[in-house]
Image (cartoon, rainbow, N blue to C red):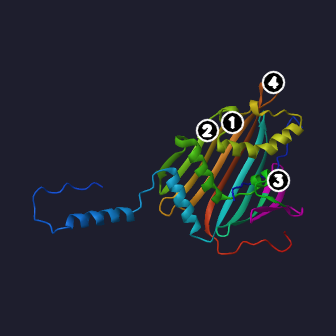
Amino acid sequence: MRSRFRSAALVLPLAFSLAACGAAEEEGPVEPAGAESSEATQSSEQAEATPAAPESPEDFLDLAEKAMAEEGAWTFSVKGQEGLTLQGRKSAATYRATVRRGMEPEALHSQGVSTSSKGTTKNEEIYVVDGTAYLKKASAPWKAAPTSDPEMQNKVEDPVAAIEEFREYAQATGDEMTLTKRDGTIELRVASDKQKLTAVRERAWVKKAQREFDPTAEQLRDAGIPVNDAQLTLSGLEEVLVLDARTYRIKSHRFEFGFLVPYAGGRDITYEQDVRQENQGTFGGKIELPAGVR
């Protein structure tokens, strides 16, 4: 289950209609035969029994995966916002949801509401079971699609999936991921400053940002505004996964980024998205599809 949410489609009322061993003493009492060998064996066994302290991002991600699997299910709160800005005029949408995430078997249930700039609200409910996502927007009928479907990837918020995503980042980007220990937490972070999309488009975290932006890009094209990937600029990106330093459980996950879209007269249309997930603790219920959803 490696998918994400996307908030409500933006209304566009603009003008265009992410050990040292101590050295043995040279002199001393004679040890019984075999004592040195026995001590060496005990020392070796003790070293094998003591796991090495985690050091790399992947070490901490392995511990996080194990820690999250120790409970049957989790509850997360989700807050998201995205917006388009041109010449100081902004169109925005916000999203809030409660996500229940089952671990074994993997399942997810999300209930949320999106709010447009004009205050219009729309309920949204999502289930993910056995590799299929089921989406219901407001009073529309349920829609089912594989979790690999781009729309479903943008709609489903799965905080636990961040573990696997960050593992992919660590393997692909090496030293560009930073690991920070502070205030009882472990923070894993990938980030980018402003640069042309073409310079970083192959990075996994940029691909995710671009997928999130694609529906809005289509809206702009429909409004007569050309959106060319070769001309896009990543205005910035930061993604942070925070673990508890004692339990290694996920505490929070944040993903924020922006794109600059060239517009007439040398101006830019700015797109921004910011999604934050917070662990609210364990969930004792069972996640099942309601009757009539399939």
Q: What's drawn in magenta, residue-wise? A: 114-143
Look at mark 3 in the image and give the residue it sits on: 119
Q: Is residue 6 visible?
A: no
In the picture of the structure, the residue carrying the numbered disc 4 is: 265
Q: Amino acid at mark 4?
A: Gly
Q: How much space separates mark 2 and mark 4, taking CA atoms?
A: 27 Å
Quadrant including the N terminus: bottom right
Label whose residue precedes the other's in the sequence (2 or 3): 3
| Residue lying at 51% horizontally and 56% vertically, measured from the top left | 60
Three-letter residue code for mark 1: Leu
Which callout, 4 or 3, points at the residue further toward the start of the chain? 3
Circle nearer the viewer, 2 or 4 = 2
Tell which of 242 and 85 is nearer to you: 242
Marks 1 & 2, CB-CB < 8 Å contact: yes
> Under tag 4, what secondary structure?
helix
Q: 206 or 168: nearer the eye? A: 168
The residue carrying mark 1 is 234
Residue 277 shows up from this direction: yes
Q: Residue at horizontal 60%, vertical 41%?
A: 191
From the viewer's perspective, tell me whether residue 70 is left or right of residue 114: left
What is the secondary structure assignment of the residue under circle 2? strand
Q: Which residue is mark 2?
A: 192
Q: Mark 3–mark 1 contact, CB under 8 Å? A: no
- SS at badge 3: loop
The structure residue drawn at horizontal position 10% and vertical position 61%, both measured from the top left corner, is: 28
- Which of pointers 1 and 2 lies earlier in the amino acid sequence? 2
Compared with 214, 99 (above or below) is: below
Tell which tag, 1 or 4, sits nearer the viewer. Answer: 1
Instruction: State the separation of the CA atoms marked 1 and 4.
Output: 20 Å
